[in-house]
Amino acid sequence: MLRIVHTQLSSVLGPVRLDDCDDGLPHLTAHRGATGNPKADAHDGYSDKAKQPCYVPRTMASMGLPLVAGYIDLRETDRVKLSAAQGKIAGFKNAGIVSVISFTAADVAAPTVASAVLATDLTITGTNLDSLAPNESIVTITGTGAKTLTKTQILAVGGASFSNTSIVIKAASIPGVAIATSSVRVKADLQNSAIVAVS
């Protein structure tokens, strides 16, 4: 998969149009024949029909995330690979208008929290805790000392750390959090983990 991210240059105020890689859109799987999508040929630019445009939004405001840079995820079809190598994606990337991130489905799998251990600092262990840019992971503490912290806020305190398998939140960031009466949930790649009690 390729993630195409809008770099939000001041000179580019709207979405970025990629019209040479339409069949890489996640919602479109092209099929031929009577049992397939009857509009597939038109979608793919056959029969003298224009290809379906593909727009990279400037922000993710449509998903309630106006501060997150806009992006789309594309399957790496032959057409998308060609665009990334020498077509519209390559051109916009070289101009600094978009950035391109290669990833697999495992990179954006739902997070899991195995433990949340309080020993002055709070250490959360699990899998897939970090988000693929431009999304940002969020730790939500419920119960005693309830608080919500982004990855950026966590790392702003010296000694804190954040990786795909471990998060260390310094005590200064979480006053009031207590064993048994506080719980933790991690949101990564727009997906929530299960809630785990602090121990």
Image: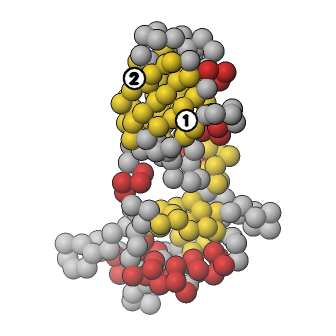
**Residue 26 horizontal side relative to residue 171, left or right:** left
Q: Nearer the viewer, residue 116 or 18?
A: 116
Q: In the drawing, what numbered circle is on residue 196?
A: 2
The N terminus lies in which quarter of the figure? bottom left
- Residue at coordinates 52% horizontally, 79% vertically from top-left? 84
| Direction left: furthest residue | 35
Mark closer to the chain start, 1 or 2: 1
Q: Nearer the viewer, residue 119 or 126?
A: 119
Residue 108 x, y percent position in the rendering: 42, 51
> Mark 1: which amino acid?
Ile
Q: Considering depth in this image, is 182 or 60 the residue closer to the camera?
A: 182
User: Compared to 139, does 199 lie above or below?
Assistant: above
Residue 106's place in the image compared with 111, above or below, is below
Quarter of the C terminus within the rendering: top left
In the image, what residue type sits under mark 2? Val
Q: Residue at x 61, y 26 (%)?
A: 170
Q: Position of residue 36 (x, y in %)?
A: 24, 72
Callout 2 secondary element: strand
Task: Give coordinates of residue 3: x percent, y percent.
Answer: 51, 63
Residue 39 quadrant: bottom left
Q: Which disc is residue 116 wearing? A: none
Q: Which residue is mark 1?
A: 138
Farthest residue, direction bottom = 48
Residue at x 55% of width, y 40% of height? 162
